[in-house]
Image: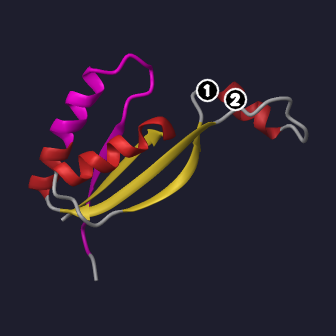
């Protein structure tokens, strides 16, 4: 079992959920987050009264799942990202689980 972590801009949230379904990953959790691309965006957010919103509305998903399902998911994400015309691909990482209860 491994931990799959996925981040995506909100624009592609539905697509990520569909990729989970196609990879037979049935159990996952998600949360709304703000994504930042550089330090200057973070500094703008540090102001008490920022003139504009600096983060991108994003989502984070994670799932404890099997290697074979992760392999399928990664293949689907690679295909999806290759067809994108934006600079906001789906990001996915895998973390091994040493122990669990």
Q: Is residue 83 above or below residue 52?
A: above
* Left or right: 44 as drawn, with respect to 41: right
* Left or right: 52 as drawn, with respect to 37: right
Q: Quadrant of residue 75?
A: top left
Residue at the image point whose x is 13% and y is 45% from the top: 72
Badge 2: residue crowd in 10 Å (few <14, some 14–19, many ≥20): some
Q: Is residue 34 above or below residue 20?
A: above
Local SS, label 1: loop
Tell me which segment is drawn in magenta: 74-99
Q: Quadrant of the N terminus?
A: bottom left
* Left or right: 29 as drawn, with respect to 97: right
Q: Quadrant of the C terminus?
A: bottom left
Badge 1: residue crowd in 10 Å (few <14, some 14–19, many ≥20): few
Q: Which mark is residue 38?
A: 1
* Residue farthest top in this picture: 85
Whether 78 is among the magenta residues is: yes
Q: Which residue is mark 2?
A: 41
Residue at the image point whose x is 20% and y is 28% from the top: 79
Whether 90 is among the magenta residues is: yes
């Amino acid at each position: 079992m491994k931990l799959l972590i996925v981040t995506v801009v909100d624009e592609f949230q539905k697509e990520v959920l569909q990729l989970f379904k196609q990879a037979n990953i049935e159990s996952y959790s998600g949360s709304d987050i703000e994504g930042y691309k550089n330090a200057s965006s973070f500094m703008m957010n540090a102001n008490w009264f920022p003139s504009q919103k600096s983060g991108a509305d994003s989502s984070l998903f994670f799932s404890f799942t099997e290697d074979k399902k992760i392999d399928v998911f990664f293949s689907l994400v690679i295909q999806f990202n290759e067809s994108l015309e934006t600079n906001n691909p789906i990001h996915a990482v895998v973390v091994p689980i040493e122990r669990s209860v």
